Structures are given as structure tokens and as C-alpha cells.
Amino acid sequence: MVVLYLPFRFVLLDSFLTLEQQQMEQQLERAHNAFQNVITSVDRISADYAGWDATYEFMEKRNESYLTATYVDEMMLTNRLNMIVLIDPAGQLVYSKGFDLDNVVETTIPTRFSQFDPTDQLRIPPQSREPIRGMVILPEGVMIVSSRPILTSSYTGEPRGTLIMGRYLNETEIQRLAETTRLQLNFYRLDDPNMPEDVRAILGKHSANDGPINQILNEQTIAGYLPLADLQGNTALLLRVEEARFIYTQGRTSILYFALLLLASGLAFGMVIMVLLERTVLSRLSRLSADIQHISASRDISAKVAVLGNDEIALVASTINRMLSILEQSQNEHRQSEEERARLQEEMIRTQEQFMQMVVHDLKTPLTAVSGFLDILAMEKLTPDQSLMVDSARRSAGGMRHLVATILDTGQMAEGRLTLRPEPTSIVTMLNDCANDLQQWATQEMHRIIVDLPVDLPLLMVDSRLMERVVINLLSNAIKHTPLGTTITLGASVDALGARIWVHDNGPGIAPEVRESLFERFSATPNRSRRQYNTGLGLAFCKLAVEAHNGTIQLQSGPSEGTTFTIILPATVITNNLAMNEVSYSGDKETLQTSEHNH
């Protein structure tokens, strides 16, 4: 429909536009001919009176009876003349008469015709008998004039002067032209202050030698323009003809009828095609789609779709059945594989935990001894290099003790055997201590730790030992798993809903595929440093320790926002007094056992 409609529309509409332009040129020609008829009419009257024995005799004898009998008001009205001028061969004014046709009164002639110099264009030279006719632009208005030599009735003899007749091209004359031609026309002078913008634009670009000009004003109107020259050949007036775009409107109507006919044909043809498609294709595809949806909803891949016919649709149905059979077989094999993998993984985790518990228990005693010896050694007078090595060894031993405690506490919390010992804890002091403990390590790794805390935080009733290790774990992870130059922010806030402690870094974030298993035991993420290793227990310990306080730990991470771990503690841990509580944590159910005593 589009392929048929668009070429037809452009070709047909272009034809109507061309026809519209041709008609406007014809209308302009009609208007111009009517204007020329006015000039011819004045010239014909001038020829009658200039080539007349009575006028020829008057120019010699100057008898007044000729004037009083000839140039009466009725003659001026009948011939629609506004001016008559008689001049002798020397250019002297012999007789003149002006007449107002609208008010039917005699008036003075324009100043332009009161005297004539030898080079005046309207004077007929003695050796010439050619008339001069056209229009002149006067301060009083535009006048159609005709100048002829005064001769005998047989147009012979020596010329005895010049006769000039004129008619104003005023509103009355223009209205008469419009009624004669049945056109909406107008004439505009170059100095007309009320000139429309379209006329001003035409006059600025075209001259009397350019011929007719057409311009579309809007969807309903078109205008034609014709510059007109005065006696000197200069552009003096612009003839403007305006009319409704009947041809263009008829063309658009014809195109609309064609489009409606094309649409109706297309709809009828489409309905026939749809009926045929419904009977031969769509109904069978609907049946196939319904079978597939039923299998998808029931998740029973042992079911099969119906195979109807012996064409491409039947081939698709057979292929789907074969695919379902293969999927069923693969699903059974995958289920068996998953069951076996789960069993092996459970055994491996159980064996790993037992082994770790044994190793950790055996490491605890020698680590305590090593730490003690290092503390004694640190009290001795050592060289700077020796002090640096001792401090590094003490930090490593402290890390091992922290790891041992983490492993033991994680196992106890997982089995429900760890007892919390909550006490009123200054969250500001605790977080500042955590930041100070890791500040030297962070500096070595070219990291920056910022503590952003309000000074008026209330005390929290928490196990300060566990909570401090949770914060240190989160800070340690931020140092280990972010690139050089990372900024780590440690903050907290307390409101009526509870307390929040967060650790934020502006690093590259955590990959989405790692986040789901991040809080599971023995789940370690890749480390940016080859010198540091992950056990996969730190975040699992953090999660168990926070949950032991009836709280939660949340993770928010992205490439453009870094990583934020948020510890959310319930409102029950907030205290404004020094009451002491002891909370026991056993099994899957938290039980609060409170004993109060005053400090």
C-alpha cells in the first residue's frame, strides 16, 4: 500500500501544483491585460480629442467656445478622466482641468503637470507623432496618462502642441478592475507603508523585467505577483492577485479518495489472507504453542507435543519432542551428578572442619609461647632493623592468634556453643581503636583509613571482643582486596530503629558471581596481593557474630560505587545507663538471660 500510495501521491500532487501555478499565471495575465486596457482606454480617448479639427483650430485661435463646449464635467465623468492638459509646441500650458470623479467636483491638476521643460518626457517632439502612454507615480497617487500630438481629424498637418489626459489608479478604479476580472487583486507602490510582508519580500528580490511570480501563502491561499514599470521603465508598482487554492484542494481530495480506496482494498485482501492463514497455519501453531505452555507450566519434560500433518510445522513438533527426550535424559543425569557432588562436598566440608579444629587447637599453645617470647624480646634494646623485624613477627603472630580465635569461635557459633558477654561499649572508642590497630598496615599498603563518627553516640550493649574482631575483619578485607591508593571509611550511626556500623571502600567492587557465596565458610575471593592468603572464614565469622547479637550484615557493591559492608544491630542493644547484661546464645534460637548489677 505504501509503495503504491507514495509515488501516486507525489506524482499526482505535483501535477496539481503545476496546474495551480499555470492557472495563477493565467490569472495574472488576465489582471495585467485589464490594467493595459485601462491604459488603452485613456489613450483612445486622448487620440480622439488630440486628432480633431476643433482642437487643432483652438490651438491656433484660442477660442473659448471650444473649451466651454468640450471639456465639461459630463465629458470627464463619461470618460472617467481626472485630468486634461493642453500645451503648445514651446511647452507653455494652454489649458488644464482637474476633476474629482468620486465627489464630482473640479480640482487642480497635479503639480507635475503645471509646467514642462524642453526635456520633459510627456512633451511630443515636433518631428514625432508617436503617442506616449503609461503610468506615472505622483505624490497625489498613481496616474494612467496618455500624451498625443495635436493634429487634424485626418491626423495630418504640423503638430500644434500636445494633449495629455490622465486617470488615477485609485481604490475605485482598482475595484472596477476586480469586478471586471472577477479577481481579488491590488496594486502596491514601492513606498507604501502598509505593504504586506509577502509583497515587501517580492519587491526586494524582483524587478519589472522578471515577469510573473507565484507564491503559496498557506494551505488555503496562493498569490501571484507582477512588477509594473512606469514611463521611465523603472519598477513602480506591484500587481498582486490572490485566490483560493481550489485546484490544490481538489488534488488532495482526490488523493484522499485514492488512499481510502487503497486502504479498503488492502483490508479486504488482508482479511482473505488472514482467513487462509488461520485455517492452514495459525490454528496448528496455536495448538503447538498450547502444548509447549502446558509442558512449561507443569515442568513435565516427559510429556510430548502433538504432531499433526507432514510439513514444516510437523517437523518442528517432532524436533521439539526429540529435544524434550534429550532434556529428560540430561536432567536425570544432572540430578544424579548433583546428588553425588552434594554428598562429596558435605563430606569434604565436615572433614575440613574437623581437620581445622585439630590443627587450630594444636597451634594455640605454641603461638602463645611465641607471642610471649616476642613480647620479651621487644622489651630489649634492639637496633632499628631488629625492632622492625620483631614488630613484623609480633604482627604475624597476632594475626595467627586472631585466625585461631576466629576458627574456634566460628565453630562454636555454628554449633551454638558460644556465650556472648555483652557490656556497655563506647562505639566511638572501639572503632577508633580498630582503625589505629590497622593504620600502620594500611599505610604500608598505601591505603587511607578515615573514621567518620558523630561524637554523641550512645553506649551499645554488645560483646566488645567479638564486635571489635568483626570490624577488624571487615577493615582487613578492605585493605587486602582493594588496589593501592584506596580510601576506606569507617562510620556509625544510631537512631530509634537501631545502630549501624559500616565499612566502605572506593575500590573496584565485588564481582556479582562472588557475592552469593561470600558469607559461606571456606569461600575465599581472589586477592590482589600474592603475599596474603584467605582462609574463607572471616566473613562467615562476621555473619555469625552479628547474628548472635540479633543483627544482620548487608553488602552493597558496584563498579562505580565501591563496596560497603553494613552491620545493623537492633534497638535493644542501645543503652544510656551502665546496666550490665549477659546474653547466652545456643542452638538456632537466641535466648537473652539478663542479670543486672550497678557500677
Image: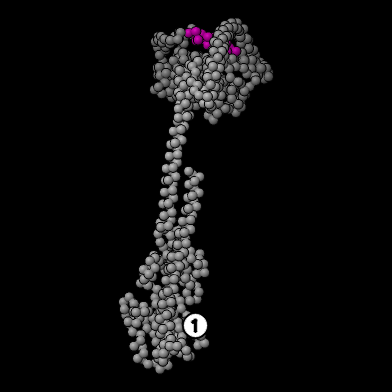
Q: Say which of 214 and 110 sits in front.
A: 214
Instruction: Farthest residue to the bottom: give it.
Output: 61
Secondary structure mainly formed by the magenta segment:
helix
Closer to the camera in the image, 193 or 376? 193
Name the residue at 53% across, 21% down: 318
Q: Say which residue appears at 58% left-offset and 7% top-offset.
A: 351
Q: Residue at x 61, y 27 (%)?
A: 484
Q: Compared with residue 55, is residue 371 higher up or lower down, i.e. above or below?
A: above
The residue positioned 39% from the left and 65% from the top of the image is 183
Residue 174, magenta (yes or no): no
Residue 15 seen in the current view: yes
Residue 308: x %, y % from top left: 49, 23
The picture places residue 514, in percent across and down from the top left corner, at 55, 21
Residue 450 visible in the current orientation: no
Residue 515 located left or right of residue 497: right
Q: Position of residue 486 (x, y in %)?
A: 58, 27
Pointer 1 local density, CA inside 10 Å: few below 14, some 14–19, many at least 20: few
Q: Magenta part of the protein: which range?
A: 400-416
Colour treatment of the image: one colour
Q: Nearer the viewer, residue 86 or 570?
A: 86
Residue under pointer 1: 130
Tell me the amino acid under the disc marked 1.
Glu
